[in-house]
Image (cartoon, helix red, strand yellow):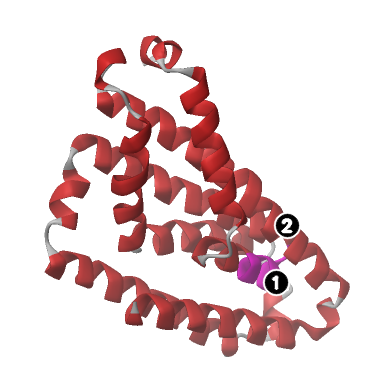
Amino acid sequence: MLTTLFAMDPWTIATFIGASFLLYLTPGADMMFTIASGVAGGPRAGLAAAVGISLGVLVHVVAAAAGLAVLVAASPAMLDGVRYAGAAYLAYLAYANWTADPALEKHKGRADVWRAFRRGFLTNLMNPKVILFILAFLPQFTDPAIGPVWQQIVILGAILGIGGILTDGTYGVFAGLAAERVRNSAGAMNKISAVIFGGLAARLALN
């Protein structure tokens, strides 16, 4: 793997990082999810959600490297199943946040961080758009002449995941810090998060 990494063109890697950074700056589902998690659970929860999302991305990357993602993408029924499962899960999160007891939410501590991580991982894992994005995006930066393509995909995927933690994590942390300033309105914060989760569910189900 290191041999492949050192054989890759530095300019290609730099271009990939630049393209990925521009994508991270574009408002999307991951950004909104980390913001919602930060608003609901504070800065640690926002960062934990970003880490969970990036771990989900890495699972998709490994599947793409193994060729499994191609099989999934070739089956519209399977993609629809994954999409609707993801939408249903986001709808559940919207309901859970809308009906959450603010008094209990304040005392969850580490459990809230773990919950945000788990939610971020599962929502990314159940988003078929991530599968299609990885299949379309990462192979453009590979070169069979310098080493196994699957290794290059894993390397690029790792860079993508780290970038996601840095950027989405920043969004989540700042959203959490802003929410902490008005933590006395915890009920309102939960409602805001619920609306975001609900919007993401509708977007995933209808697109």
Q: Is mark 2 on a helix, strand or loop?
A: helix
- Residue type at the position of mark 1: Val
Q: Which numbered marker is on residue 173?
A: 2
Judged by its main secondary structure, the magenta piece is: helix
Q: Residue furthest bottom?
A: 99
Q: Distance between the residues labelled 2 and 1?
A: 9 Å
Q: Which amino acid does label 2 sit on?
A: Val
The residue depicted at 56 percent of the width and 67 percent of the height is 33
In the depicted view, which residue is nearer to us: 109 or 206?
Answer: 206
Q: Which residue lies furthest to the right in this view?
A: 181
Report whether 1 appears left or right of 177.
left
In magenta, the rendered stretch is: 35-42
Residue 148: percent from left, percent from top: 25, 20
Q: Mark 1 points at which residue?
A: 39
At 21% from the left and 71% from the top, the residue drawn is: 81
Q: How crowded is mark 2: few (under 14 residues within 10 Å), some or many (20 or more)?
A: many
Residue shown at 34% from the left, 41% from the top? 61
Q: Give the residue at x 12% y 56%.
A: 74
Residue 1 position (above or below residue 204): above
